[in-house]
Amino acid sequence: MAPRIVIVDYDRGNLRSVQKGFERVGYDAVVSRNPKDIANATHVVLPGVGAFSDCMDNLDRFELITPVVAAVRSGKPFLGICLGLQLLFDESEEFGHRPGLGLIGGRVQPFPADMTDADSHRLKVPHMGWNRLHIVRRSPVFEQVPDGAYCYFVHSYHVVPDDLGVVSCTTQYGVLFAAAIWRDNVVACQFHPEKSGETGLTMLKSFAQWKG
């Protein structure tokens, strides 16, 4: 039986790009903000681009907080992408303190302003471009991804989990930060798999095949 993949549409995110990514690996995905579609999905994807507060406001405005939380708690495979990772946490420090969905303990904080690389060159924020993953715990979504694979990032904030045991991948950019987390049926990544070439497509395919 083919998975019913629903990409949550709250008017913040590269929805069509994510949808096309699934299509390229042979799976249909529906973009929807209908709570019934989310409830009936076998797999749910929460993307996101922009400011944390705007994303939370839109989830609230479209009455999607309850369906998203229910999807996570249902045990079905759930994938968060970029802001979709950050929104799962307790709060963000972006433009003050704003509560998130509170599904993963921890916070979202900015990169330090004075970061440098190994050669003492000042690093720009946002962190934008290709960077390497170090796999700490291999989630089902990362089964076919080699350690050291490159993925595409665009972000100025990163997550700091209370429980480091949820960290699946790390990346170095001035500081070592959590590039992906995995807990039970939830995998979420700071990078964009839909923009990460064959590596990202491999992740989307593994997610679609994951039974949770």
Image: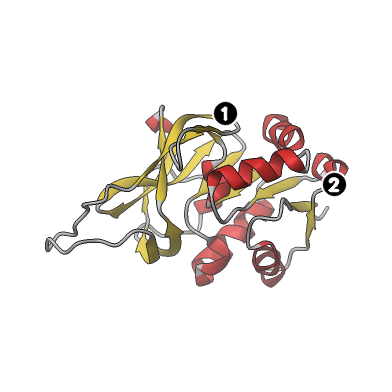
Q: Nearer the viewer, residue 42 or 91?
A: 91
Q: Residues within 10 Å of mark 2 (few under 14, many from 20)?
A: some
Q: Which residue is located at x 72 percent, y 69 percent?
A: 23
Left/right placement of residue 124 relative to residue 196 reads: left
Q: Is residue 98 left or right of residue 155?
A: right
Residue reaching furthest right? Answer: 36
Which element is circle 2 on? loop
Pinpoint residue 24: horizontal percent, then vertical percent: 68, 72
**Tag 2: residue type?**
Asn
Task: Please name the residue shown 46% across and 42% down the image.
Answer: 95
Numbered tag placed on residue 34 in the rendering:
2
Kindly identify which residue carries mark 1.
Answer: 102
The residue nearer to you, when weighing 144 against 100, is: 100
Structural distance between the alpha carbons of marks 1 and 2 = 22 Å
Q: Which mark is residue 72?
A: none
Amino acid at circle 1: Gly
Badges 1 and 2: C-beta atoms under 8 Å apart?
no
Q: Measured along the vertical axis of the image, is residue 12 above or below residue 66?
A: below
